[in-house]
Amino acid sequence: MFSELSVIALLQGCPGSAKSTLAKKIKAVAELNSLSCEICSADNYFMKDGKYEFDSSKLYLAHSYCKYTFEEAVKNGVNWIIVDNTNTDLKSIKHYYTPNNGYKYTIVRPNTPWYFDAEECFKKNTHNVPLETIERMINSIKKFSLEEVKADILWI
């Protein structure tokens, strides 16, 4: 069931940093290699008939949905599980990190020129996240420590 190809990729970045674009590219590579892949994202909760209908009052439900999707993917032994959320601090990552569950963990950051540019991420984000919040997220990422998470950071 599990192999060296069983990976949980925790995408990390603020809104507008190109995480969802990267998640789709990773999934395409997995499927080209005949690996099962699941993108777990709070954003998926807001998809209605192919359209994205974000409602900030339902964020708690969206994150619960994401965690449920993740748990189901682990239970079903999906090869690659991509958590497409901001994951800017250890608290958010701990929802998805369970050591010794058969998966290799990696933290993946989009290698975009604007990754640490709050104003550019603000312009590109589709969630109407305020600039101040994006700045706070970027500062959190810059202080991020892997001491409690046994994972590598990859820039893709």
Image (cartoon, rainbow, N blue to C red):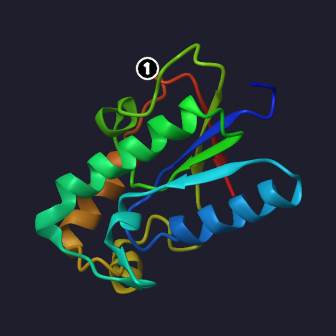
Q: Is residue 113 at all visible to an observer of this figure?
A: yes
Residue at the image position 49 percent from the left and 28 percent from the top: 146
The image shows residue 12, relative to residue 71, as above or below, that is: below
Q: Position of residue 147 (x, y in %)?
A: 46, 20
**Residue projecting furthest to the right:** 33
Q: Quadrant of the N terminus?
A: top right
The residue beneath circle 1 is 148
Q: Quadrant of the C terminus?
A: bottom right
Is 69 displayed left or right of 8 in the figure? left
Using a 10 Å C-alpha cutoff, classify the residue at mark 1 as few (fewer than 14 neighbours), some (14 to 19) or many (20 or more).
few
Q: Is residue 111 at all visible to an observer of this figure?
A: no
Residue 121, quarter of picture: bottom left
The image shows residue 101, relative to residue 132, as above or below, that is: above
* Mark 1 residue type: Glu
Q: Position of residue 140 (x, y in %)?
A: 32, 47
Is 149 displayed left or right of 67 in the figure? right
Give the total number of marks visible in the rendering: 1
**Residue projecting furthest to the left:** 57
Q: Position of residue 137 (x, y in %)?
A: 30, 56
Residue at the image position 50 percent from the left and 66 percent from the top: 115
Q: Position of residue 122 (x, y in %)?
A: 33, 79
Question: Residue 145 or 17: which is nearer the viewer?
Answer: 17
Residue 50, quarter of picture: bottom left
- Report helix, strand or loop for mark 1: loop
Residue at the image position 72 percent from the left and 39 percent from the top: 79
The image shows residue 31, relative to residue 99, as above or below, that is: below
Residue at the image position 56 percent from the left and 22 percent from the top: 150
Is 27 displayed left or right of 116 in the figure? right
